Image: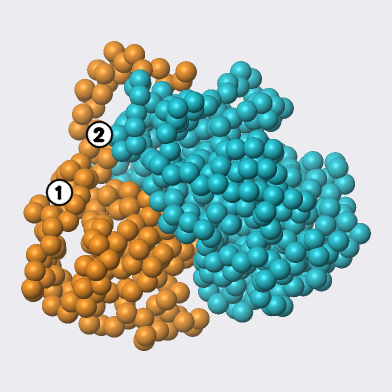
Chain colours: A cyan, B orange
Amino acid sequence: MNIVEKILARASGKSSVSPDDVIFANVDKVMIHDVSGPGVIKVFDKLKKQGISVDKLWDPTKVWVAEDHFVPSAEKVSAENIVKLSNFTKQYGIEKHFKYGMGQYGICHTLSHEEAMVMPGDVYVGGDSHTNTTGALGAFACGLGHTDVAYVLLNGKIWFKIPETMYFKINGKLPDHVMAKDLILKIIGDIGTDGGAYRTMQFGGSGIDEMSVESRLTMCNMTTEAGAKNGIVESDQKVVDYLTSRGATNVNLVKGDDDAEYSQIFEYEASEMEPIIAKPFSPENICIVREAPNVELDKSYIGSCTGAKYEDLEAVARILKGRTVKIRTEILPAAISIYKRAMENGLLKIFLDAGVTVGPPTCGACCGAHMGVLAKDEICISTTNRNFPGRMGHVESQTYLASPQVAAASAVTGKITDPRDLI
Amino acid sequence: MQSFHKVTSIVTPLDKVNVDTDQIIPKQFLKLVQKSGFGKFLFFNWRYDENENKKSEFILNDSKYDDSHILVTGDNFGCGSSREHAVWALLDYGFSVIIAPSFADIFFSNCFKNGILPISLDQKMVEKLQQESDPVEIDLEKQTVKTSSEEIFFEIDPYQKKILLEGLDDIAQTFQYEDKISEFEQRSKIPSVL
């Protein structure tokens, strides 16, 4: 069995499973946030009306809550949702509620690794499509709708059809200034936004071994944009060290069997990769940065679960050090812990000296919520994950998806820029 | 959840592929958690201009389709964000059947939790249906799509068929067996964590 099959077999108490088997899996962790949480509360209200008891959750210690999409609240509806969420966690005795303004908080997917909430081998589900991110730790991680999340909260289980696995073997090492984001955009460009539909996208090979845990998180995060059920990387010592340094104990490695089967195998030579962007209005609409359209950018946005981890900010700082930005540039670290490290290590000073506005952790403008959304006709280069029409603001705004280094280099020139041409 | 058996109406052809949930219901409406009323925000940016006037060229604004319950659209419908609001908006607007060559995974699953029947048919059939001007009958029991000229069989998972026919989502369905579940839990040897 491959790693996903092994995890799901264990979680369903079966000795083996194969693609297309339907199983009922025990869930190890479940996450809700300030959009899916109120959605779940709505489902609970509906169930109550039907006379179904929703007095108790299956296991409040396995549930955790993030505030990220609409915080800090910009208006009263968002504020009310946060109050609703707080009442919910209080009522059900959920202790892991990361509240803004009270120490660590941030984007849910970022907290999943920053706070070592998920372990290799876990079945982890969340009320958000980018839950796939956390598969980089060697877990089976996938997003669910609100009704399914409500079901898990009450029962601790959910059914899955065992997905087929597409294996992406990455050979070699990415060149300087080429990041995991470039590689995953290339893959999405090749297979399309439905290329991974109801399948696992597993990444392996020497190129993945070389990669940091945070780069692997970027890879898995974007599997959602290929329509994949989940993304996954087999855990190794890097994952153990990463989680242990964040307070986890007894981290076990989980790997597939030597004779694991995959429905398709794709091979990529990392050393041949180049910086890539996805043009409006689809993540599959890619081109090489050096062949990008010569557009005047209005904005550079460095944020989100995809592109504002510590390593991303470090890469941005290397570009911005001693330079100034030519267009409006925002950096929103994805969690308070990242923000703090950026402060301690002098990154914030580099950003501020370059003229950047540094904002609080939040999904912010990535989902067009607040904190610098785009006006009509504005053109933005962004480290986020989606560029559908209106995703980051006005429906006639445009977003180019890019790596943190490309977004930073472009901030300096005001044009879509390959970081190698800046240096 | 409303049970689903049969629907007869004209189809609304939406000739687009990769329709994502940001287009089905834009982010500004996600904050709303009222029980219903998401229908008026369905395809908001396609239906309305900046001043919230109806855009006459968008198909949903053609009054001919006001009573349509069947949306016929392109590949990978419902991709992107997992927001269940997308399904709530389609249902509240009046669509109970969506026909496409393929659907995005989370969206597809969300349909069954809310009483919408998503039907996958091959590309040619979908294109043909988009041209159909007479009412089309969808019969879930028989698993057929009937037009003025032909009757087409569609596939559906038996369990998903059952929950739509009975109008029970997974949760309601499970709680029908609450006694048995508690009994099983007492005896279960499956550890939740290894």
User: What percent of the width, then of the height, locates residue A333?
Assistant: 71, 50
**Which quadrant is home to the N terminus of chain A?**
top left
The reply to whether residue A194 is in sight is yes
Name the amino acid type tagged 2: Thr
Q: Residue shown at 60%/72% (left/top)?
A: A398
Residue identified by numbered label 1? B165
Horizontal side of A59 relative to A177 (left or right) equals left
Q: Secondary structure at mark 2?
A: helix
**Which label's residue is closer to the chain start, 1 or 2?**
1
User: What percent of the width, then of the height, locates residue A186?
Assistant: 58, 57
Asked if A264 appears above or below A364 in the picture, the reply is: above
- Quarter of image, res A352: bottom right
The reply to whether residue A96 is in sight is no
Give the residue at the far right of this rendering: A322
Q: Residue shown at 37%/85% (left/top)?
A: B57
Asked if A139 appears above or below B28 in the picture, the reply is: above
Name the amino acid type tagged 1: Leu
Q: Residue shown at 25%/34% (left/top)?
A: B174
User: What percent of the width, then of the height, locates residue A51?
Assistant: 25, 38
* Residue B174, numbered label: 2
Give the residue at the far bottom of this rendering: B56
